[in-house]
Amino acid sequence: MIELADVQAAARRLDGVAHHTPVFTSRTLDGLAGASVHVKAECFQRGGAFKFRGAYNKISSLGGEVRTRGILAYSSGNHAQAVAIAAALLGSRATILMPEDAPVAKTEATRGYGAEIVTYNRWTESREEIGERLADERGLELVRPYDDPLVMAGQGTVALELLQNAPDLDVLVAPVGGGGLIAGCSTVAKSLRPGIRVVGVEPEAGDDTARSLAAGERVRIDVPRTIADGLQAIEPGELTFAVNRERVDEVVSVSDAEIIDAMTFLFDRMKLVVEPSGAVGIAALLAGRVRGKRIGVVVSGGNVGAARFAELLSR
Amino acid sequence: MIELADVQAAARRLDGVAHHTPVFTSRTLDGLAGASVHVKAECFQRGGAFKFRGAYNKISSLGGEVRTRGILAYSSGNHAQAVAIAAALLGSRATILMPEDAPVAKTEATRGYGAEIVTYNRWTESREEIGERLADERGLELVRPYDDPLVMAGQGTVALELLQNAPDLDVLVAPVGGGGLIAGCSTVAKSLRPGIRVVGVEPEAGDDTARSLAAGERVRIDVPRTIADGLQAIEPGELTFAVNRERVDEVVSVSDAEIIDAMTFLFDRMKLVVEPSGAVGIAALLAGRVRGKRIGVVVSGGNVGAARFAELLSR
């Protein structure tokens, strides 16, 4: 389990390094949601998503010798960029293992932050095997995307900042993939405001955490088909689930069409660029699946790309 | 002429009513521009553009009796929404004269803010005649979009806030349509930092202010064909030109293709939704048409709409 003090320690490490992202309000959104809504815009975080917080908190806590040898991460998404930026800032070097068919834009962005990209064929090769071999040969330290106390604590700084801006929330809403963001955020929320409700949001097809909470144990599902590419976890993390079963009150789900509606709303009315995974909280609000008077929503990232955004709209 | 004190008075009127919009920075943008760039994001202003500042400053300065009779504006764009919001906040009522073929989204948004929409056929009717008749019959007060000292002073609060955030700018860049925004902003900039360069940006096809500055008098052009629908002025305002000929150092221009590139950059890398007219400053920077070390850029609005954005990208 992580506690508030772990998140507060993360906040000190991130001070002056991570952005204190702005919190937006919209009268139109308030009207549609029937609540006062505070939107924490992590699309403006370094690397375009909240992931930088956890990655930096983890890597900055490693010993100098470990950092000198270097960092390893598996990811084709926001975690890869976050680890690359954090490693570069801390004088370390990141090696990122990505499928060879990952979008060129993501590969290039990650390389642009100074990381070495190692690709593998995801149909014929095991990334775990390749990762282990690389870690052994080069002495690299694996930074997991969510199942790590320092990563969860780093992500919790999102809620710490949001509650500084809007201290009287009665509901906190956050996306759920592996569960690291909501583990950190629920830890903060339940410590600072014991009566707050913490609501997670998953894509309909990827409801592994909702099922796991219902079953009382971690449930594994097939790789979900959803446009929310950051929320395609097939089962909750071991450490994140231990936190979330205690501190998350409910997990609701949204369809891909609802996610696109939310992205369009955020674009048209709030002028925010939000990726599918980042928009699930607003999607749940607009679909009437979250009730409350003062609701904080984490919009977790903005790495969608203009061309892909246009393609999603034309569906 | 307006002076710094007029803008400071506007700032007092706008305090707690207009948003202090955030200022964004981007390492990628700094690298491309070869400068430290501060982006003032007026897309997050009420109504989605800077126009609210001027409209509210004007309407709040009118006598109570005038406000009770009501406000009139001609506009199919951001000025209409700004006047509608400001009038509603001040207990007045706005009548907005719009062409009957104006986009439904804009008509609906303006009506949503409580304004009465009067439409006219822009091919067979004169909006000035209809406007004058309405003003006479109903005793309405016309609020001009730029050629008014109180409107110019209101828009100048953009630069006042930007220079609070980034006091050491050596260049300030702003879009130029009728010239109200840059008149207010240049007044502030030249008062607070006499050595600053103020650079305006027009669409290539709509370079009436650049021509007018070169000629030393107001020059009228044909209605420009450009995607920057907010910058389709056919000649500078009388009052704005009197200010801008003294305080604007240079006006550069950008093509529609450069504007689309800038909108895409702002979307992809900065997660900002910016309309074509709002993106001309960034377009000029990315095209290498503005030099400086510490550059402030006003991104003036975000009312483009997701569908139109997608359409522009596919050009």
Image (cartoon, coloured by chain):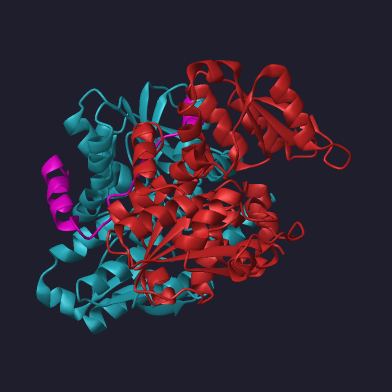
Chain colours: A red, B cyan
Q: Observer-nearest residue: A16 or B31?
A: A16
**Horizontal arrangement in the rendering, residue B27 relative to residue B216 (left or right):** right
Seen in the picture, residue A103 relative to B18 is either above or below; the reply is above
Quarter the C terminus of chain A occupies: bottom right
Residue A37 location, quadrant: bottom left
Q: Residue furthest bottom?
A: B137
Asked if the stretch drawn in magenta spans residue A91, the answer is no
Task: Name the residue located 71 percent from the left edge and 22 percent from the top edge.
Answer: A136
**Horizontal arrangement in the rendering, residue B139 relative to residue A8 (left or right):** left
Seen in the picture, residue A145 relative to B118 is either above or below; the reply is above
Task: Name the residue located 28 percent from the left edge and 45 percent from the top edge.
Answer: B158
Task: Name the residue located 80 percent from the left edge and 39 percent from the top edge.
Answer: A101
Residue A47, horizontal then vertical, whole percent: 53, 37
Residue A170 visible within the image: yes
Asked if the stretch drawn in magenta spans residue B26, the answer is yes
Residue A264, horizontal then vertical, whole percent: 56, 63
Residue A313 location, quadrant: bottom right
Residue B126 visible within the image: no
Q: Residue furthest right?
A: A124
Task: Name the residue located 57 percent from the left edge and 32 percent from the top edge.
Answer: A83
Seen in the picture, residue B44 relative to B263 is either above or below; the reply is below
The range drawn in magenta is B1-30
Residue B133, horizontal then vertical, whole percent: 30, 79
Residue A42, horizontal then vertical, whole percent: 46, 48
